[in-house]
Amino acid sequence: MAVVSFPFYLDCPVVEVQFRRMDGSGTVARRLLVDSGFTGQSAFVLPSADEGLVVQRLAPETETAGALHGRHRRIWVACTMPPIGFRDTLLAICTDMTPLALPPLIEGMAGLTFLQRFQRWGGERRGDGSWQFLLETTLGPQAP
Amino acid sequence: MSTPPPKQLGDQEIARAICSQFEFGGQRFRRGQYVAILKGQVLAVGESFEEVQRALAAHAPDPRHGLICLVDTPAPDVIRRW
């Protein structure tokens, strides 16, 4: 079992996820807002500019409802969280994120489909009163 | 006057057909299968992304060519305004 935690950012639950680059030259990190109310087959929303950077393969376009509505491009992304041994290939919507009105320096969203890949997830108040967001896997850390 | 040839479906249209009908071109598909589609044809079907990605990459190394579809009943992604 392995746990990773992220301090809330601007009072928002966030996670930092590594995405494998399209050309295989390492990964890029993205700080993502966590929202279990983001539901559907897709795990992430990323900015359009990330498509050419982290696409592993194109995916069928998706219909979205809510703050983002209409048809949007979608890609497969290979994501990792080495401290807890997490590695998966999931669907990401790539689009203009302006309608989401995300807080500054938040680079996308992670939804329920991402969270359900973990054994346990959620917010926790620390002894000093601050909040952190936890993800737990049954795996161990990956070797460097 | 001759009849125009039937329009070939694009990769995106084929993926929509597979997920809405669980069938395409006489081939049946199950929920949870991964399907690689390239140039209007089903290239590979498998139980994992990696399996069909390998098959697709052999024909289309550029990941911006072809697509991989996860067979499932179409449902919208719902995203709230933060």
Image (cartoon, coloured by chain):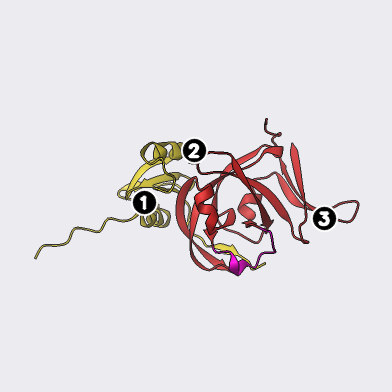
Chain colours: A red, B yellow
Say which label, 2 or 1, has the lower sequence index: 1
Name the mark nearer the viewer: 2 or 1. Answer: 2
Q: Which residue is mark 3?
A: A131
Residue B57 image offset from top left, x and y in percent: 41, 39
Does B73 appear above or below A86? below
Identify the amino acid type marked 2: Glu
Q: Residue sitting at 44 percent across and 36 percent down?
A: B54
Q: Is residue A113 left or right of residue B5?
A: right
Chain that bears disc 1: B
Residue A40 image offset from top left, x and y in percent: 56, 58
Residue A35 image offset from top left, x and y in percent: 67, 59
Which label is found at residue B23? 1
Local secondary structure at mark 3 = strand
Mark 1 and mark 3 on one chain: no
Q: Residue sitting at 46 percent across and 58 percent down?
A: A61
Q: Quadrant of residue B42?
A: top left
Residue B30 image offset from top left, x and y in percent: 44, 46
Chain that bears disc 2: B
Mark 3 and mark 2 on one chain: no
Q: Which residue is mark 2?
A: B50
* Residues at marks 3 and 2, CA–CA distance in whole angstroms: 37 Å
Residues rendered magenta in the picture: A96-106
